[in-house]
Amino acid sequence: MRKTSARRAFTPASDLPYRTGAGFRDATLTNTIALYLGAALALAIGADILINDGVGLMFLVRKFLDLVEWVVFWR
């Protein structure tokens, strides 16, 4: 006779108890939200260039490149 193992039923992440309410299921990125985020990013970059001569942006670029170099090291 063949033994059958007791399998637990698959539970999708959307049905887990810590994702109750609206949660992540109803969160969508619409075109309007994407445009507002893009405009806010462009304004922040423009303000940094005008006010700080791009020092903050250059700092973020250097840190990002350090992160990329670190990730490539662990490849």
Image: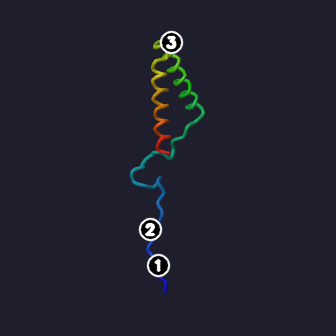
Kindly report which numbered mark, 2 or 3, lies closer to the viewer in this rendering: 3
In three-dimensional space, the C-alpha distance between marks 1 and 3, rounded to whole angstroms, equals: 69 Å
> Which is nearer the N-term, disc 1 or disc 3?
1
Is the residue 59 above or below the residue 1 in the image? above
Residue at the spot 49% in from the left edge and 36% down from the top edge: 69
Q: Name the kind of residue labelled 2 in the image.
A: Arg
In the picture of the structure, the residue carrying the numbered disc 2 is: 8
Distance of mark 2 from mark 3, alpha carbons? 59 Å
Q: Secondary structure at mark 3?
A: helix
- Extreme residue in the right direction: 31
Q: Is residue 56 above or below residue 28?
A: above
Q: Which callout, 2 or 1, points to the residue nearer the camera?
A: 1
Q: Secondary structure at mark 2?
A: loop
Q: Position of residue 46 (x, y in %)?
A: 53, 17
Counting other residues with Cα less than 10 Å from the Cα at mark 1, is it few (<14), some (14-19), or many (20 or more)?
Answer: few
Residue with the mark numbered 1: 4
| Circle 1 SS class | loop
Do the numbered discs 1 and 3 sit on residues whose CB atoms are within 8 Å? no
Residue corresponding to mark 3? 50
Name the kind of residue labelled 1 in the image: Thr
| Up-down relation of residue 59 to residue 33 (above or below) | above
Three-letter code, disc 3: Leu
Residue 31 x %, y %: 60, 33
Of 1 and 35, which appears nearest the observer?
1
Q: Residue at x 47, y 27 (%)?
A: 62
User: Where residue 40 sits: x, y (%)?
Assistant: 52, 24
Which one is nearer the viewer's eye here, 40 or 16?
40
Residue visible at 55% across and 27% down in the picture: 36
Residue 61 in picture, x, y percent from top left: 49, 26
Location of residue 34 by image quarter: top right
